[in-house]
Image (cartoon, rainbow, N blue to C red):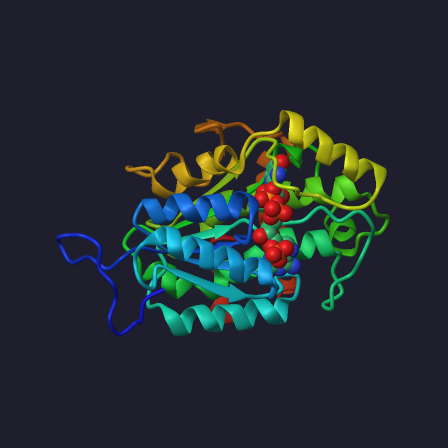
Amino acid sequence: MSDPATPATHDAFDAPTRTALITGASGGIGLAMARALLEHGFDVTLVARPTPRGERAAADLAKHAGRDGAVTFLPADLASLKDVRRLAQDVRARTPHLDLLVNNAGAFVYERALTEDGFERTFALNHLSPFLLTHLVTDLLLAAPEPRIVTTSSAAERMGAIDLERAASGTPYSAWRAYGWSKQANIHFAREAARRAPDPKVRAYAFHPGFVNTGFGGGSGVLSRLVALTQRWFARTPEQGADTGVWASTATPAIEPNGAFLVDRKVSTPSSAARDDAMARDLWERSEAWVELTPAERWNPDAA
Ligand SMILES: NC(=O)c1ccc[n+]([C@@H]2O[C@H](COP(=O)([O-])OP(=O)(O)OC[C@H]3O[C@@H](n4cnc5c(N)ncnc54)[C@H](OP(=O)(O)O)[C@@H]3O)[C@@H](O)[C@H]2O)c1
């Protein structure tokens, strides 16, 4: 990402380079999105946990970019709300505007585990973390001419209405239900973000990437080995999985309606549970409390 004082340029009109923050970009769909967005002229900041995987992905991508400063890696454990806050500060120190936030980091968690904040891990990483991060970079998004928020959801959202207390606590625990509810939460988030955004220029989408060969959900159990085998035989490539997210990020004019759920480059209708407006509001307001947003960090309380 470029120095805030001297924004890089990439076109004849001297417009500032568009910047994208992509979580879960050390591999899989996020890395494929980062590569495609670079080709669309974005500077990209990749986020993943502080391991060599993320550093390596960023270094490889930087070679591919052919532009100095076009790729940055920022490590963060997004299952920790404290680390999400620290990440947001790092981002703010590096760029004056954010044209695109891709909330893509996610996990399938086989056994119930609680985060340091006391939330079930799937719910914390897949829903609370993007919810908080989005709020903390709002002013950077508002500083961009056509800001977009794109969240990687899944067709696995079809798990019926979310039981919010059970989702947050993981009690009783079902890994598939926890994952499905977290991905349904991504759809509620996009719809509600479109409704509550502090400026109508903010566009928010959720998308299903298809069944993608990324090693996602990898573990040592029989079920995860079966998933890995099926992925190898039947799944899409990460580039194919990233395609609808790249479309949502770059389509001109922006896709209508704002808040849409997208599958295979089309506006799609998610489950009836994912279209429940009362649930979207309830989830939003409970999430504001769970991540402890200050009044100043909240979006449009009048829309409640
Ligand atoms: N693959 C599929 O078939 C499929 C289908 C539908 C939806 N999705 C969704 O697509 C998204 C990306 O998944 P993928 O298939 O590309 O799998 P992946 O290759 O496992 O990517 C997951 C990404 O999330 C990052 N991540 C995981 N835990 C993290 C944490 N605590 N903090 C920060 N980053 C973390 C990982 O980075 P590090 O491990 O390096 O930290 C990695 O970059 C997920 O949201 C998933 O739900 C996938």
Figure check: 71 above or below 64: below
Name the residue located 23 percent from the left edge and 60 percent from the top edge: 16
- Which quadrant holds residue 289? bottom right
Quadrant in the picture for the N terminus:
bottom left
- Percent position (x, y) of residue 279? 63, 44
Rendering coords of residue 103 (x, y %): 52, 51
Residue 269 at x, y percent in the picture: 54, 27
Q: Is residue 227 left or right of residue 74?
A: right
Q: Does residue 237 lie above or below 194 as drawn?
A: above
Please determine whether, in this image, residue 61 is positioned above or below residue 75. Answer: above
Q: Is residue 279 visible?
A: no
Q: x, y (%) of residue 23?
A: 52, 55
Q: In which quarter of the image is residue 97?
A: bottom left
Is the residue 17 above or below the residue 208 in the image? below
Numbered label tally = 0
Q: Residue sitting at 24 percent across and 71 percent down? A: 6
Which of the two residues, 291 or 263, is positioned nearer the viewer here?
A: 263
Residue at 38%, 65% (x, y): give it. 139
Q: Nearer the viewer, residue 183 or 223?
A: 223
The residue lying furthest to the left in this view is: 12
Q: Quadrant of residue 188?
A: top right
Residue 257 visible in the snapshot: yes
Left or right of residue 61: residue 178: right
